[in-house]
Amino acid sequence: MSLEDTFIIFMKFIIPLYLLAFVIYAIRAFRGPTIPDIILAIDCMSFDIAAFMAILAVYFKSVFLISGAITLALWAYLLDIYIAKYLVSREVGA
Amino acid sequence: MSEVLFYLGAIMIIIGGICDLFGAIGLLRFPNFYVRLHAATVGTIGGAVVPLFGVGFLALGSNFLPHKYAIAGASFVTGIIVLLAAPAGAHALAYAAHKAKLVQWNPKCDHLTEVKKHD
């Protein structure tokens, strides 16, 4: 068995694990009682979609998915910092 | 040698998926925001950094990828970015939630309020 066939079988175990985690994070993002809960759930979802895009880049043999992963990681950090800034200065939120 | 790198990366991706699922369940089940930050650390560091390094090793060890060095290098860079950005973002969010008094909780002791009182 070549390494490519091993990887195809391996993906069948990996994809449900990550998709189930995305669904649970999305439930917390919709149900979150306060604003920091929603932002935390969206953060975790973005970082894990970045990791899953790197796995899909190997699966589809494409380099272009990786640039999306880098942008997604930086975007989640920016979301954290801006929401924290506006919560501290009390301009947005309650 | 390349098979060793491939299977090391595959094991790291499986560990990342399991950490991701446990972090998600913790984020859903834990009672308030400050406890949920703990599960979010499991979900970001264990669930994003470890599989990104795993994808880097797997791409270096594979023999069927056309651009394997580009995918491996970009995966390592993304892993280092997440490793630096996730704790800083979580820390800023926890400080903002404490400062804006958004979360209902009953602490035994609150060191940040005591430090603010002495200033």
Image (cartoon, helix red, strand yellow):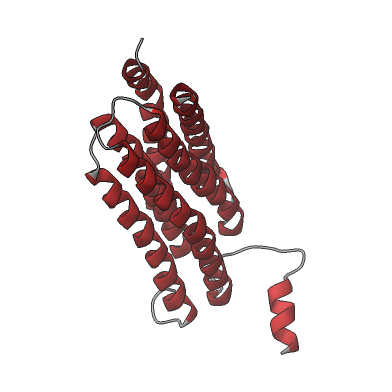
Image coordinates for residue B18, horizontal then vertical, percent: 51, 32
Residue at image point 36% right, 29% down: A15
Q: Toward the viewer: B18 or A90?
A: B18
For the view shown, which residue lies furthest in the top direction?
Answer: A1
Residue at image point 37% right, 17% down: A6
Image coordinates for residue B115, horizontal then vertical, percent: 73, 80
Task: Examine the rendered structure and indicate whether residue B58 appears above or below residue A25.
Answer: above
Image coordinates for residue B43, horizontal then vertical, percent: 51, 45
For the view shown, which residue lies furthest in the front direction?
Answer: B1
Task: Examine the rendered structure and indicate whether residue A15 appears above or below residue B75.
Answer: above
Quadrant location, the C terminus of chain B: bottom right
Task: Examine the rendered structure and indicate whether residue B40 appears above or below residue B94.
Answer: above
Can residue A31 be spotted in the picture? no
Q: Toward the viewer: B95 or A47?
A: A47
Dividing the picture into quarters, in which one does residue A63 lie?
top left
Image coordinates for residue B64, horizontal then vertical, percent: 29, 25
Q: How many marks?
A: 0
Task: Examine the rendered structure and indicate whether residue A68 appears above or below residue A16.
Answer: below
Q: Is residue B101 left or right of residue B53?
A: right
Residue at image point 56% right, 55% down: B37
Dividing the picture into quarters, in which one does residue A90 lie?
bottom left
Can residue B9 be spotted in the picture? yes
Residue at image point 72% right, 70% down: B110
